[in-house]
Image (tube, rainbow, N blue to C red):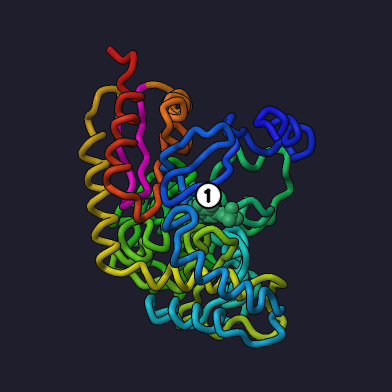
Amino acid sequence: MKMESITSLDQQYVAGTYGRFPVELVSGKGSVLTASDGKTYIDLGSGIGVTSFGIADEVWTQAVTAQIGKLQHTSNLYYTAPCARLAQALCEKTGMKKVFFSNSGAEANECAIKAARKYAAEKKGAACSTILTLEGSFHGRTLTTLAATGQEKFHTLFQPLTPGFACVPANDVQALAAAVNRVNPAGILLECVQGEGGVVPLTAEFITAAAKLAAENDIPLMIDEVQTGNGRTGSLYAYMQFGIQPDIVSTAKGLGGGLPIGATLLGEKVQSVLGPGNHGSTFGGNPVCCAGALSILNRLDDSLMAQVREKSDYIFSQLTGAPGVESVTGMGLMIGIKPVKPAKEVVMACLEQGVLCLTAKDKVRLLPALNIPMELLTQAVDVLKAACAQGIA
Ligand SMILES: *Cc1c(COP(=O)(O)O)cnc(C)c1O
């Protein structure tokens, strides 16, 4: 089928929730994607930080296909090895104690919120239910995770959202401390780098202050690592760069390498809070998704993390202060570039030149595969640099 007809079929039958680029992708290898017209693209978006080792990665494909040929689904009524082994690996690598598996980032956050609420209800009473979140945050699209999301534009016309959330300014320690005193929260939820909010890193001062406030007041500290997790920021999880130990970590996106999986990691404080019947998921812990995720997790070692940081340094050094670039922010291979021109214009110019980038608010956002070859990265950065500079005096 021709590209035009797929485009019109999609526009006719798929709910119009996405603004798509005029590209129909058909295949790929690593960080190179091929469109239906034969044009190839260097991928700096990896499906929004999902395909951690690129497209059709051999190790991941082998792990997934071996499992799919044996047992593709069982329900959570039975034990399976990939689920148990993945939970073990996640706990051993983080010091967390238990894992609940779901299918997406929003669901991972829903579980985090339920765990925090139940901990607080049992320990402090049902009135202690408010979760503190930050302005500019993004935690998902369900009505509850939208309520947690500190961006009004996502809330309009979907009221009433789930009650029990209060939003404080990011990086404002005093405001957070005041809110803790005022609302007696059941949890504090934050992203170390706000992704959808514009690739805005929180300050180390704020993150450590939040951890301290949480510990002093017996409030579960919940870190949303849906986007920042799984090697994306140059450490297994972003919180690890701040010397804190969260009580709850939610993750998804890059964990699955391209199959849907969410995970909520429960630390010592809340490890026993969820019991039989308190939570569940039909697909959660699916053996194929878990086998793929385990193969990803096993490869996120120190040497790969050093490469992620090296490639990050390269991007920062090439683009910081470059013509047409106002700022470069982020951590590891999660990078936001604020161009002088509208970000969308830069992204369209890159697309024209065979490079796929993302946006986040007014930034061009880069989330390349963690193993993107240096040769492709330098080519793509040259294109991006030229797109930012073009037409700028
Ligand atoms: C993408 C994202 C989510 C939502 O994940 P879904 O898989 O789309 O539900 C939640 N939190 C953060 C920080 C994200 O980046």
Residue stretch in magenta? 327-340
Q: Quadrant of residue 144?
A: bottom right
Residue 166 visible (yes or no): no
Q: Quadrant of residue 365?
A: top left
Q: Main secondary structure of the magenta part?
A: strand
Q: Residue at 23% across / 36% down in the picture?
A: 318
For ligand 1, give the image quadrant: bottom right
Q: Amino acid at mark 1?
A: Phe
Q: Residue at 76% across / 34% down in the picture?
A: 9
Q: Which image quadrant: the C terminus? A: top left
Q: Is residue 203 above or below residue 79?
A: above
Residue 33 visible (yes or no): yes
Q: Residue at 73% across / 38% down in the picture?
A: 157
278 relative to 317 in the view: left or right: right
Q: Is mark 1 within 8 Å of ligand 1?
A: yes
Question: Which residue position holds label 1?
Answer: 138
**Residue 330 drawn in magenta:** yes
Determine the residue located farthest toward the right in the rendered image.
13
Q: Using the image as rendered, state which of residue 101 and residue 192 is in the foreground.
A: 101
Residue 264 percent location from the top left of the image: 54, 71
Residue 122 percent location from the top left of the image: 61, 81
Q: Which image quadrant: the N terminus? A: top right
Q: Residues within 10 Å of mark 1 (few under 14, many from 20)?
A: many
25 relative to 307 in the view: left or right: right
Residue 226 percent location from the top left of the image: 49, 59
Is label 1 in a helix, a strand or a loop? loop
